[in-house]
C-alpha cells in the first residue's frame, strides 16, 4: 500500500465489539431450587434487570458489578459473557462462525484455553465434537495469523470458553469466573460425598443466621457448613482464595478498577468472635479434615471443633443448629441410619431448647425418623440427590 505524500498511515488493531459489550448482559449459572435467593444476592451486588430462567439468571452489570459478583457471590457457579450468538445447523457452520471471532482479543499464543460444551435438541448432538470444532477454529485462526497456537489445558486453562447449543441456536461465551465458583479453595481435604459449597451457602442463607446467637454443627464432616457460615458472618468474599478470574482475559478488562473493587470488598471483612461458631463429629478423621479446612480461612482459628458423639454432648440452647447428617448413599446401612436420626431428634428435643435446627436430608425417607414436627421444608438438590432442608423449632 502506498502512502499519499505528506501523510503517514498508522496501522493498529481496532478491538471488536462483542455481544456482552453491546448489551451489558450476562448469565449466571445456578441451581433452580436456589434461584430466588441467588437473584436477590445478585441485586445486592449491583446487578440489574434480573431475569431468572431455567438453570440460571440473566442480568445486566457494568464492569464494577461484574467483578464484584465474581468475587463475592456465594450462590452461583459461574458467570458467562456472550461473545457470539447465531443459528447453527451443522458443525461446519459452527467452525466457520467460531473462526470469525478475533481470539487474539482474549489470549495470546502463549496462553492456554479449554472449551466446555452443552448441546440439546439440535442437529449438532455431540458436545465433545462441538468442543473440538471451537478448538480447531481458535487454533487455526492463530496459526494463520502468527504461525503459532495456544495449548489446550482442560484442567486449569487461562481462558474458559463455553458453548451452548439448543434448538439449533448456538451461543459462544467467555466464562468470566474462570472456572466453577463453588470451588472456593479452602477445602483441601474432604470426606465421602461432601456437600457442594454453594449448597452449604444456600443453607446458611436460609437459616437467616446473623451472628446474634451461636451456631453449631454436631456432625460437621469436612466443615463445609461451618466454613460457609464463617464466610457469611465475616463478610469474607467467597472467591478470596482465587488467584485468577476469567474476566482478566476480556478485551475491555480494567485492572485498576478490579484492584479498587477487590480492596473495597476486603475492607468490609470483620472478626469472628470465639465460640460463636463451633462443630463436632464422632470421627477423628472428620475432625482432622475440618480443622485443616477451616484454618485455610482467616478467623478459622476461632472456630472450635471437637471429637464428640452428639449423643453425649451438652447441646446448644437458644442458638442455631445446622447439619448435614449421613445418609444411605454414604453409609449404606438403613437400620443404623434410622437409629441415628431418631437419636438426633432426641438430642434436639432434650438438649437444644430455644434453638432453631436446620437439617439437610439427602434422602427424604429419614425425615419421618427424626420424630419432630417441621416448621418448613425446602427442596434442595445436592450431589444429584433430591434432598430437603427442614427447619425445626425447639421449645
Image (spheres, grey):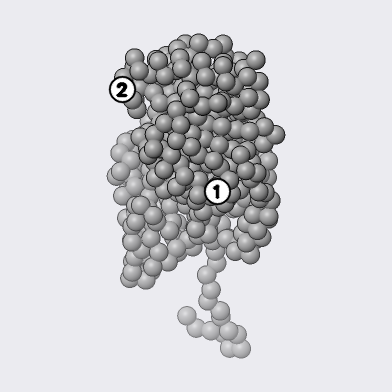
Q: Is residue 311 left or right of residue 60?
A: left
For residue 181, say whether it is visible: no
The quadrant holding residue 104 is: bottom left
Q: Is residue 113 left or right of residue 295?
A: left
Q: CA distance from mark 1 to mark 2?
A: 34 Å
| Image mark for residue 301 | 1
Determine the residue positioned at 50% across, 49% down: 295
**Residue 235: % across, % down:** 64, 46
> Which callout, 1 or 2, points to the residue nearer the camera?
1
> Label 2 crowding class (10 Å Cα cut-off): few <14, some 14-19, many 20+?
few
Residue 90 seen by the camera = yes
| Horizontal side of residue 118 vs 295, given as left or right | left
Q: Is residue 232 above or below residue 369?
A: below
Quarter of the figure with residue 90: top left
SS type, badge 2: loop
- The residue drawn where x is 47% and y is 61% is 106
Mark 1 or mark 2, earlier in chain: 1
Q: Residue at x 64, y 28 (%)?
A: 319
Q: Badge 1 local density, few (<14 within 10 Å), some, or many (20+)?
A: some
- Furthest residue in direction bottom, as rendered: 6
Task: Provide residue 156's location: percent of width, then percent of height.
Answer: 39, 54
Determine which quarter of the picture holds residue 351. top right
Residue 141 rendering spot, x and y as whole percentages:
37, 62
> Which residue sits at x=54%, y=64%?
15
Residue hosting label 2: 332
Q: Nearer the viewer, residue 46 or 135?
A: 46
Q: Nearer the viewer, residue 22 or 76?
A: 76
Count of marks overlaid on the render: 2
Residue 86: which disc? none
Quadrant where the image shows the C terminus? top right
Amino acid at each position: 500500500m502506498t502512502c499519499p505524500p505528506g501523510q503517514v498511515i498508522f496501522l493498529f488493531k481496532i478491538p471488536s465489539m462483542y455481544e456482552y459489550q453491546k448489551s451489558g448482559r450476562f448469565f449466571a449459572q445456578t441451581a433452580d431450587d436456589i434461584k430466588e435467593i441467588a437473584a436477590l444476592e445478585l441485586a445486592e451486588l449491583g446487578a440489574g434487570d434480573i431475569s431468572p430462567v431455567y438453570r440460571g439468571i440473566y442480568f445486566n452489570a457494568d464492569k464494577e458489578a461484574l467483578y464484584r459478583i465474581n468475587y463475592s457471590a456465594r450462590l452461583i457457579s459461574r458467570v458467562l459473557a456472550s461473545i457470539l450468538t447465531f443459528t447453527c445447523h451443522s458443525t461446519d457452520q459452527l467452525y466457520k462462525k467460531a473462526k470469525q471471532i478475533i481470539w487474539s482479543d482474549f489470549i495470546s499464543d502463549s496462553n492456554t484455553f479449554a472449551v466446555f460444551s452443552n448441546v440439546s435438541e439440535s442437529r449438532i448432538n455431540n458436545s465433545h465434537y462441538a468442543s473440538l470444532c471451537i478448538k480447531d477454529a481458535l487454533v487455526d485462526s492463530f496459526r494463520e495469523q502468527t504461525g503459532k497456537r495456544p495449548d489446550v489445558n482442560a484442567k486449569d486453562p487461562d481462558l474458559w470458553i463455553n458453548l451452548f447449543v439448543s434448538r439449533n441456536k448456538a451461543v459462544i461465551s467467555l466464562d468470566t469466573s474462570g472456572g466453577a465458583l463453588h470451588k472456593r479453595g479452602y477445602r483441601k481435604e474432604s470426606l465421602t460425598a461432601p456437600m457442594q459449597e454453594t449448597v452449604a451457602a444456600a443453607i446458611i442463607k436460609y437459616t437467616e443466621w446473623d451472628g446474634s446467637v451461636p451456631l453449631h454443627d454436631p456432625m460437621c464432616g469436612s466443615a463445609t457448613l461451618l466454613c460457609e457460615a464463617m464466610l457469611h458472618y465475616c463478610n469474607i468474599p467467597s472467591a478470596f482464595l482465587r488467584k485468577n478470574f476469567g474476566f482478566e482475559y476480556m478485551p475491555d478488562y480494567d485492572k485498576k478498577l478490579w484492584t479498587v473493587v477487590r480492596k473495597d470488598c476486603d475492607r468490609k471483612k470483620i472478626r469472628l468472635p470465639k465460640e460463636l461458631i463451633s462443630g463436632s463429629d464422632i470421627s477423628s478423621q472428620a475432625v482432622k479434615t475440618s480443622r485443616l479446612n477451616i484454618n485455610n480461612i482467616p478467623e478459622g482459628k476461632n472456630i472450635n471443633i471437637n471429637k464428640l458423639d452428639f449423643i453425649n454432648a451438652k447441646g446448644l440452647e437458644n442458638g442455631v443448629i445446622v447439619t448435614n447428617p449421613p445418609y444411605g448413599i454414604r453409609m449404606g446401612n438403613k437400620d443404623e441410619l434410622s437409629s441415628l436420626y431418631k437419636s438426633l431428634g432426641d438430642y434436639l428435643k432434650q438438649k437444644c431448647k430455644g434453638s432453631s435446627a436446620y437439617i439437610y436430608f439427602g434422602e427424604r425417607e429419614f425425615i419421618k425418623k427424626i420424630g419432630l414436627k417441621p416448621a418448613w421444608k425446602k427442596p434442595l438438590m445436592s450431589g444429584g440427590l433430591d434432598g430437603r432442608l427442614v427447619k425445626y423449632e425447639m421449645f
